[in-house]
Image (cartoon, rainbow, N blue to C red):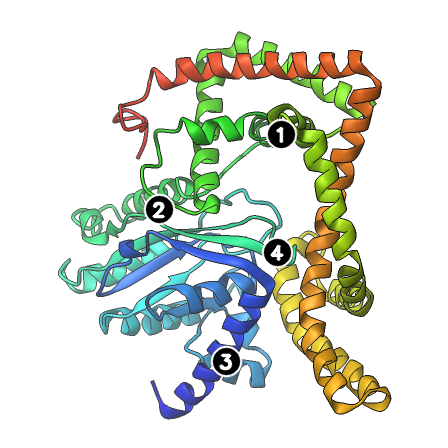
Amino acid sequence: MSLLSKFIQVPLSGLVRVLLGVYFRRIEVFHRERLPPGPVLVVANHPGSFTDAFILGTCLPRRGQFLAAAKLFRFAPIGWLLHRCGIIPLNRLEDDPTAMRSVTGSFAAAFRALEAGGMVVIFPEGLTYDDSRLRTLKSGAARLALELEQRHGGQLGLQIVPLGLTYSAKERFRSEVLVYLGNPILVANFLPQFAERRKECISGLTAKITRRLQALLVNLPEMEREHIVAAVKRLYFARLRLGNLLIREPVSALVEETVLTQAMVDALAFAEREMPDELAAFLVHLNRYERLLAQLRLTDSAVEELAAHRHARARIYGVGLAGLGLFPVALVGWMHWRPVTKLIDALSGRFLHVGKRKAQAAHARMIGGLLIYVLAYGIFMTVAWTWLNPLHTLFYGLALPVTGLVGHYYFAQAGRLYRGVRTAVVLLRAPLAKHRVLWMRAALLKRIEAMRARYRATLLPDGSRPVGEAD
């Protein structure tokens, strides 16, 4: 790395870390020990546009170079900056049908980095998207890896590490991100027949990468499945956490949710194959339960809270009293920062692509917020300086970020508090409705328990699938 590149990368990396730390409440790297030394090609899904690169560029234990679409380099100043940051341009065929020469050049740059024992990161889906479903992987990653390993006669030791990125709500401020590293794939194992059966080897390695990535994500190929899994999570997730066999080590709530949701998807596929009648009966009951909640304008989370806590009403009203005490502080923060936030959302929304708004929201708000929040803070402090003495202005300036965060969390939780109070009032005033809701919910849980018992009977003692049913 040249001195100029280092001079540019170090402050940019620090700035990106600050922006990520402000925007996201938590970024967790799970199984970081799976990133080995030596030449590594990291293959990741791409649900968050530039934010994906920001996260992987600052949170992985090794510094890597990224392959990015060559169209990002067309504006000369941006291209110069990206080159200085170690980004390698990759000209895709859909961008330029005559681009095979530049694709070969991009591979050459990646080859040099990997031959030096470095790490290269690639997003083989080739696009970014709003939902969480994995798209079809392009074969470029497998082709790059096999061609390089063939050059060295299978002795380079290149490994492919699949990496799953999961956002709890990528478009929402103070959400969470999970960076989930999979087991490495030794490229040399796919090399013996590469010279004679080139396409088959590339397809086989691509399929292997796809399966490994799917194991790191909550991959729901159909919207109906997504609805069912979401409903089961609302009803049963708390119980599933208590009796799971998959997690035997201390992990964060986000890791636990991802792993257990993956198990729910697998169990649903099992139920579709082995218990179609029971699953159909469960869906009929689920639809009736959800229609009843809609008629009463209740949420299942609020019903669960009331069912789980013996003193739910006292708890709800106690939280309400605490909320009254924090209201003035939250209101001050909300009045200062809510108009600024709305302005950032409006401006960033004008530049986001339709169909990719959630994927692009994080980096648009981080970059726009860096400019607009600093400008707004300066205006607030300038106005305060004209009206207050220096000491009071200092206290005012220190209080602005604190009241802003209190306001954000306060009004984010206000809806939950309101729904809980409303649920308590409705169920107290309509005891028959209360008994019907709780009975239907208990019946759904009983059906889930019965299907879960049949599914668990097919698992190994450690909770994994038998050999031949999982990669």
Residue 100 located left or right of residue 192: right
Give the alpha-carbon distance from disc 4 to disc 1, as whole Å. Answer: 21 Å
Q: Identify the element where label 1 is drawn.
A: helix
The mark nearer the N terminus, 3 or 1, is: 3
Q: Amino acid at mark 2?
A: Ile
Q: Which quadrant is home to the C terminus?
A: top left
Q: Identify the element where label 3 is drawn.
A: helix
Give the alpha-carbon distance from disc 3 to disc 1, as whole Å. Answer: 41 Å
Give the alpha-carbon distance from disc 4 to disc 2, as whole Å. Answer: 23 Å
Does 407 appear above or below 73? above
Q: Mark 3 and mark 1 in contact? Answer it, CB < 8 Å.
A: no
Q: Which mark is residue 359?
A: 4
Residue 125 placement (x, y as % from top left): 48, 52
Categorize mark 1 by other alpha carbons within 10 Å: few (<14), some (14-19), many (20+): few
- Image-quadrant location for residue 415: top right
Does 58 appear above or below 206? below
Residue 300 placement (x, y as % from top left): 68, 28
The mark nearer the N terminus, 2 or 3, is: 3
Q: Which residue is mark 3?
A: 12
The mark nearer the N terminus, 4 or 1, is: 1
Q: Mark 4 and mark 2 in contact? Answer it, CB < 8 Å.
A: no
Give the alpha-carbon distance from disc 1 to disc 2, as whole Å. Answer: 27 Å
- Image-quadrant location for residue 298: top right
Residue 434 located left or right of residue 126: right
